[in-house]
Image: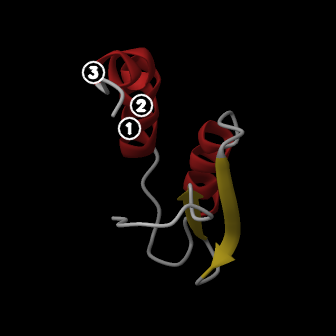
């Protein structure tokens, strides 16, 4: 298994920026259109993710390595 620490450190600044932005622009449940766009923009930078949008209207499901066999989370 790869050491995940360098991977987390690489994306952490962008994730913190996204979190701050989301908290500065709160949205009501099932009306999180701006939030969904921001999250999708960040997830779209990873070509290994299979993205499904519009789940429950504004939800996003990101799947990584679904084609592989074995345990998953």
Residue 12 percent across, percent down from the top left: 36, 23
- Mark found first going from the N terminus, 1 or 3: 3
Distance from the alpha carbon under mark 2 to that under mark 3: 15 Å
Give the crowd class for mark 1: few <14, some 14-19, many >=20 residues within 10 Å: some
The residue indicated by pointer 2 is: 15
User: Secondary structure beneath disc 1?
Assistant: helix
Using the image as rendered, state which of residue 61 and residue 18 is in the foreground: 61
> How many numbered marks have been drawn onto this rendered protein structure?
3
Give the crowd class for mark 2: few <14, some 14-19, many >=20 residues within 10 Å: some
- Mark found first going from the N terminus, 2 or 3: 3
- Reply above or below: 53 against 38: below
Give the crowd class for mark 3: few <14, some 14-19, many >=20 residues within 10 Å: few
Looking at the image, residue 5 sits to the left or right of residue 14; the answer is: left
- Reply above or below: 18 against 58: above
Residue at the (46%, 34%) spot, across then down: 18
Looking at the image, residue 25 sits to the left or right of residue 41; the answer is: left
In the rendered structure, find residue 58 and report the number of the disc placed on it: none
Q: Are marks 2 and 1 in contact (CB under 8 Å)?
A: yes
The residue indicated by pointer 3 is: 5
């Amino acid at each position: 298994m790869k050491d995940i620490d360098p991977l987390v450190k690489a994306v952490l600044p962008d994730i913190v920026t996204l979190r701050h932005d989301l908290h500065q622009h709160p949205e009501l449940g099932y009306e999180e259109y701006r939030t969904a766009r921001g999250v999708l923009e960040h997830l779209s930078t990873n070509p290994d993710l299979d993205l499904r949008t519009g789940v429950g209207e504004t939800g996003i499901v990101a799947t990584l390595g679904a084609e592989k066999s074995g345990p998953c989370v």
